[in-house]
Image (cartoon, helix red, strand yellow):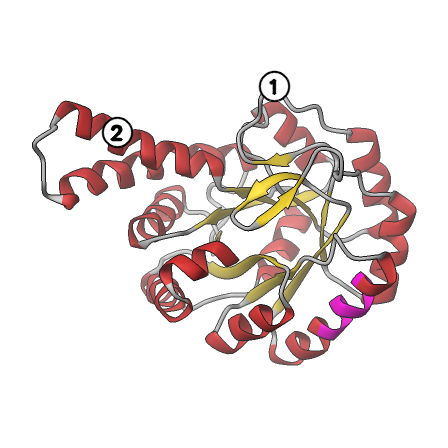
């Protein structure tokens, strides 16, 4: 099938009221797990790579793995850059064949964020590459991107409206109370803020930091207009948890396949659970 654009996936999700899962991929086994889960659920899926994942696996290796997965896939697959804070990195991903990129200018002053987002759009739009932007700061740490609790701020609805009008962006990540990494308590999402933002921008909304958010809260966010839900920490927990279990049960095991295989299977199951929560099961075409 080949890679598809995130804009196409989210446009269909918008019409039918579900969300597409965006799952972070760091190695071959996780790429395989994401694809297997999506095919078993007959769901469209977004494989995304952070700047840290690209540094770890290598841009060409990561792009090549996901492209190969997409070519053999029975479901629509997009390849997305997650939290691209460096303009040059964003351009490298576009050149490498990513079908979607996120330019994260959320730490910049509003007008500078607008200017840089427009710059990325001017390059990506003509060649059919989707662009996601972020407004407001989502707390926590994801690879090299860190936002402290003091720095984290919710997205201002009026600023969101202005930002979308000035950029023409087609999907927007907003800060409504989620955070990257593992939560110390139960997150409380500002649904009233989300509803206002959606009424003003009328484009698909992206929810970052969704691992650890109760299923009911995620589903309510989807009812209010979230169309892309990012999951990373839950994948890490499942993958590493299975590795630890196998190594504890078989301390003399030296075949990495016997350790990474169960980790891949546990990852498949957590991704399938998320896909069902997002309502995208059976939405492949």
Q: Under tag 1, what secondary structure?
A: loop
Instruction: Identify whether 13 is placed above or below 65.
Output: above
Decide: marks 2, 1 in contact (CB < 8 A)?
Answer: no
> Does 146 appear in magenta?
no
Magenta residues, start to end: 113-119
Magenta segment's dominant SS is helix
At a point 38% along the width and 67% down the height, the residue shown is: 67
At a point 81% along the width and 44% down the height, the residue shown is: 198
Q: Position of residue 35 (x, y in %)?
A: 36, 51
Q: Position of residue 162 (x, y in %)?
A: 90, 57
Residue sitting nearer the eye, 28 or 52: 52
Residue annotated with mark 2? 244
Residue annotated with mark 1? 185
Q: Position of residue 208 (x, y in %)?
A: 62, 42
Q: Under tag 2, what secondary structure?
A: helix
- The disc at residue 88 is none
């Amino acid at each position: 099938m080949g890679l598809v654009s995130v804009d196409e996936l989210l446009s269909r999700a918008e019409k039918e009221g579900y969300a597409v899962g965006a799952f972070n991929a760091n190695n071959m086994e996780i790429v395989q797990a994401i694809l297997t889960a999506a095919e078993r659920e007959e769901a469209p899926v977004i494989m995304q790579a952070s700047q840290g994942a690209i540094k770890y696996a290598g841009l060409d290796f990561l792009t090549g793995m996901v492209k190969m997965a997409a070519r053999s896939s029975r479901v629509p697959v997009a390849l997305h850059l997650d939290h691209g804070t460096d303009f040059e990195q964003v351009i490298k991903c576009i050149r490498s064949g990513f079908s979607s990129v996120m330019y994260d200018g959320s730490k910049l002053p509003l007008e500078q964020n607008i200017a840089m987002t427009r710059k990325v759009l001017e390059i990506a739009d003509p060649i059919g590459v989707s662009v996601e932007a972020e407004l407001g700061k989502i707390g926590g740490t994801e690879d090299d991107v860190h936002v402290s609790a003091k720095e984290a701020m919710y997205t201002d609805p009026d600023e969101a409206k202005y930002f979308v009008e000035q950029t023409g962006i087609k999907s927007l990540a907003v800060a409504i109370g989620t955070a990257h990494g593992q939560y110390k308590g139960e997150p409380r999402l500002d649904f009233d803020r989300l509803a206002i933002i959606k009424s003003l921008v009328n484009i698909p909304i992206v929810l970052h930091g969704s691992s650890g958010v109760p299923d009911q809260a995620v589903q309510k966010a989807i009812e209010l207009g979230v169309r892309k839900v990012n999951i990373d920490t839950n994948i890490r927990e499942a993958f590493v948890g299975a590795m630890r279990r196998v190594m504890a049960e078989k301390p003399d095991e030296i075949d990495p396949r016997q350790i990474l295989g169960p980790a891949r299977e546990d990852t498949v199951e957590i991704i399938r659970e998320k896909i069902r929560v997002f309502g995208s099961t059976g939405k492949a075409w």
